Amino acid sequence: MRRRGLLAAALSAPFVASAAEPRVLKMMGSANVAGIHVPANVASRELLQQIGPYGPTDFSRLEKQSTITQILVGGGIDIGDTDTPSVCAAANAGANLKIVGQFYASVDLVFTADGDKVRTLEDLTKPGIVAGINTPGDTVHAVLLGALMKHGIDPAKVNIVALGGSSARMRALLSHRVHLVPIHADQANDIAAQGNYQVLIEPWKEFEFWSNEVWAVNGDWLAKPDNQRAVTDLMEAQLRANRSATTDFAWFANMFRKYSNDRDAAKWPDERIRGEWSLLTQEVKAWPAPMPLDVGEFNKLIPIYEKAGIVSPGASFDKIIEPRFLAEAQKRLG
């Protein structure tokens, strides 16, 4: 049997494991769980166990996704939810990493500006204007640079500073120490109610394709047939969760209250959750069917990554994107 036939047989064959010893996958992901993250969390924590003989996932969380990428490089976990730029940087530096799926499509962050000082992207080049981000070279930095480049604005003319987490960025904006910061879309209305603050960049309107967070694995780990099957099963779980999140508001609302790390999430009324759900499903299109994983689309991000100093000239996603397992999962669901 040819190699391709062997792979197809391995992926379609029943998963054989002892009922007394279900497999426990070791995963790691972002400490933040917003609405856009909910389906993938449900997939890895609940639906995966309905697809195959897996025990409760050993899922730990870290603030910095670049650290998750480094742990993947060292083989410390099975599967990681990490940021796309750090995987690209590590792989192009020689690490054997593969992207097997997207945690979600696009991105729900927006860049909100101090409307008294900044009304257009061009205003960001004025003296005294400061844009705040989390960390230089991270995915949020890349979003900002990509938007500037699209509109012909030289990023070198914009004063961009690192401010850390979302709470620090919001405090800096409200105190007028910075004039543009990225925040989650659901926070934009809260900010607008406190002064003249306006959304200046909505990434889903700026980019035809954007990848923010991905499911990534170590290539050596992925070489084993049992691990290939686990990835395929996880992708199926992800697609099932995406479909439920997109078509069933009640499902999404219940799972949001269960998994969001917003301290008041369990008390959010349907009306408030519905606003976020409508944004994610209708505008951001966070959970499309089929889920995209096309190397050509990923490679369109490389010029932005180069400008951000994430990768060196000549970098690509050519040897990083591994779409076979997502394609098999989508085939299972029809």
Image (cartoon, grey):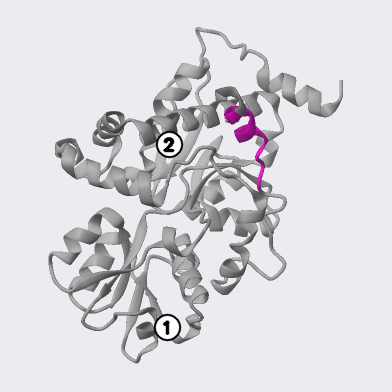
* Quadrant, the C terminus: top right
- Residue closest to the eye, 16 or 107: 107
Residue at 33 percent across and 81 percent down: it is: 130
Q: Is residue 171 left or right of residue 111?
A: left
Residue 167, image x and y in percent? 25, 61
Q: Quadrant of residue 119?
A: bottom left
Q: Which residue is identified by label 2? A: 40
* Residue 90 in sight from this viewpoint: no
The crowd level at tag 1 (other Cα within 10 Å; few <14, some 14-19, many 20+) is many
Q: Amino acid at mark 1?
A: Val
Q: Which residue is identified by label 1? A: 158
Residue 254, image x and y in percent? 25, 30
Residue at 44 percent across and 41 percent down: it is: 287
- Residue closest to the eye, 206 or 134: 206
- Tell whether position 96 is magenta: no
Q: CA distance from mark 1 to mark 2?
A: 35 Å
Q: Which residues are magenta?
A: 321-330
| Main secondary structure found in the magenta portion | helix
Q: Looking at the rendered structure, which numbered label has been put on residue 105?
A: none
Q: Amino acid at mark 2?
A: Ala
